[in-house]
Amino acid sequence: MNKSEKIISDARKGNFLADLPDLLEIATRKGGARGPVWEAAAAAVQILFWTGEFAQAADLTQDLIERDGPLGGELCDQSTPFRPALLAGQLYADEPAAPRLAACAERIPDGRYMRRDFEWLSQELPRQGVEPLLPCHSDWGGAVRPLDGVIGAGLVDRNYHELDRKQRRLVWEALSETNDFTRAHQLLTDTGEEPEQYSICLWMAGWYATRGEVEHGEQMLLAAHSRWWPFAKWDAIPDAPVLQPTLRLVVTDKVRDHYLTRPIGPEAQAAE
């Protein structure tokens, strides 16, 4: 692991706030290897989301891309969390995203993923708005969709207690896929068993948020914490709970403290 990855790993032990200054120091370096710089910036941006510093996260993202984008390194193949940093800057810090997306895209060589993504976003943003373009958006409060053709549909009406672990996961996935929160809530109530999948915990938390059931939403976000796993070494902390406006309704002080101070992912597993 490089220095940034070591700091990020330490942050995932519950030291996010303590390690943020070191990550910001590396993220703003102008010399040296660039891989650790963008990795530190990515992790810092995620932590800044949780501390509510959305303007700083957007500024850090734009400064990084303006400086390192023309170099054509690994940064140019990334998306999250830099994409949501610019989007969230509009939603929570009154910093229009489309001009920043377009300006950042100009700093990235033709053909690279980040440039294509940012160009598409700057054009799509006026049509969709910010919220659907942020991570883990769901049709909270929307209609139930048919089960026809959905994987796991044939298991939904089976006795849940007679299903094995894989089948139970498929039941939750089918309910989420069809947006059938009523049945999902009843299943949780009847069994006391929360879904194993991080994304489905977020889906349920959002539904509870739309119903004003903060305590239940809080419970699902706390459950989601133990189910999250980083998809890359720089991935420090899940950010959807504080990016999605609906989920933010159930990000209580208890949830925020839990995410910022408790071990998570592989570091939590190692601590068990």
Image (cartoon, helix red, strand yellow):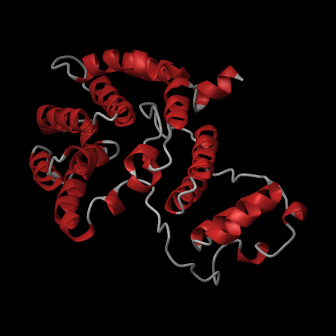
Q: Is residue 8 left or right of residue 114?
A: right
Which residue sits at x=67%, y=21%? 271
184, 85: nearer the viewer: 184
Q: Is residue 49 left or right of residue 92?
A: right
**Image position of 90 with respect to 8: above or below:** below
38, 254: nearer the viewer: 254
- For the N terminus, the quadrant is top left
Q: Quadrant of residue 172?
A: bottom right
**Image position of 88 with respect to 139: above or below:** above
Coordinates of residue 39 in the picture (x, y in percent) = 34, 29
19, 33: nearer the viewer: 19
Which residue sits at x=57%, y=41%? 228
Coordinates of residue 93 in the picture (x, y in percent) = 21, 43
- For the C terminus, the quadrant is top right
Which residue sits at x=64%, y=64%? 173
Q: Quadrant of residue 174?
A: bottom right
**Residue furthest toward the front?**
212
Q: Is residue 131 left or right of residue 34?
A: right
Residue 1 appearing in the image: no
Q: Quadrant of residue 4?
A: top left
**Image position of 99 with respect to 271: above or below:** below
Coordinates of residue 123 in the picture (x, y in percent) = 17, 65
Which residue sits at x=76%, y=59%? 189
Coordinates of residue 267 in the picture (x, y in percent) = 59, 25
